[in-house]
Image: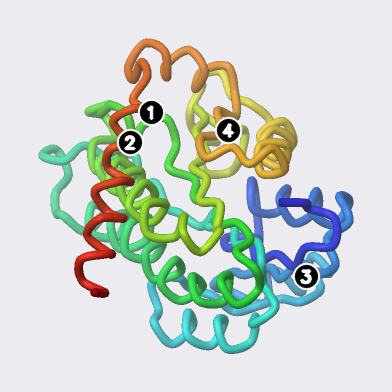
Amino acid sequence: MKIRGATALVTGANRGLGRAFVRFLREAGCAKVYAGARQLESLRAAGVENAVQLDITNPGHVDAAAARCQDVDLLINNAGVAKFTPLLGSPTVDNARLEMETNYFGTLAMCRAFAPILKQNGGGALVNVPSVVSWFNAPMQGSYCASKSAEWSLTKAVRFELRNQGTLVAGVYAGYIDTDMAASLTTPKTSPDDIVNRVLAGIEHGNEEILADERSETLSVELLGSYAPFESRMQQTWDEHQRRITR
């Protein structure tokens, strides 16, 4: 799809990668960019137009956003949390529960709410941001990796279900990004601007898998190989199932 003239909604838009998405979408000629965040004050303080109060783990917020943003044809599910804690070494499961509620269930809620809106607006694009850690588990941040792996699987499932309505469902993969979320880490990081540039180019080219930095390019070869033929068979399985239940 074309970015110029599109109407976009970006979740987690108050900082880091989300804020970069909002800025680049405007510069690329979007007709309108809705910016969603849990706290409206953080958006208003930055002078953001079309601010939407949106905690993706809050069903009321998700429903209200869908009711308000009926003109959206580009949804960027950027909102996420990372506590960077191990699964067994944490004193409670609270961090794991929060990461799963946000990165998996919150993203799923947004997909469910906006799939019919994208359909009514010609298909458009739905973009999730699973990260390279959806492909492996780094035990120092075990629960975050598990939630991102769930989001990766969710993204593929949503792609199967929405392909026939003409919606591009894209997954974005990157290593550490130079944002507040990764501020405490000393490993090499990619700038949010570089990530967003690659993502927007990938959307315009219709790429379902967007490798947004060098680390994702390297790991995709090392860990995944080519799974496109298998994914194609899964799409056929879904399509055949749909034909059976609609007879």
Residue picked out by circle 1: 228
* Callout 3 touching callout 2 (CB < 8 Å): no
Cα gap from disc 3 to disc 2, whole angstroms: 44 Å
Position of residue 121 relative to residue 237, above or below, is below
Secondary element type, mark 3:
helix
Within 10 Å of the Cα at label 4, are there few (<14), some (14-19), or many (20+) other Cα atoms?
many
Q: Residue 140's spot in the image, x, y percent? A: 26, 29
Q: Which of marks 4 and 1 is nearer the N terminus?
A: 4
Residue lying at 76% horizontally and 74% vertically, measured from the top left? 44
Horizontal arrangement in the rendering, residue 47 relative to residue 181 (left or right): right
Dot 3 alpha-carbon crowd within 10 angstroms: few under 14, some 14 to 19, many 20 or more: few
Query: Disc 1 marks which amino acid?
Result: Ala
Residue displayed at 50% across by 27% down? 175
Please identify, in this view, whether the residue under mark 4 or under mark 1 is nearer the observer. Answer: 1
- The answer to which of 50 and 139 lies nearer the viewer is 50
At which x and y percent is residue 225?
36, 15
Q: What element carries label 2?
A: helix
Q: Name the residue under label 4.
A: 177
State the CA–CA distance, disc 2 to disc 4.
Answer: 28 Å
N-terminal label among 3 and 4: 3
In what element is the residue under mark 1? helix
Q: Are marks 2 and 1 in contact (CB under 8 Å)?
A: yes
Figure quadrant of residue 244: bottom left
> What residue is at 59 percent from the left and 79 percent from the top?
53
**Which sits earlier in the primary sequence, circle 3 or circle 2?**
3
Q: Name the residue under label 3.
A: 45
Q: Nearest to the eye among marks 3 and 2: give it.
A: 2
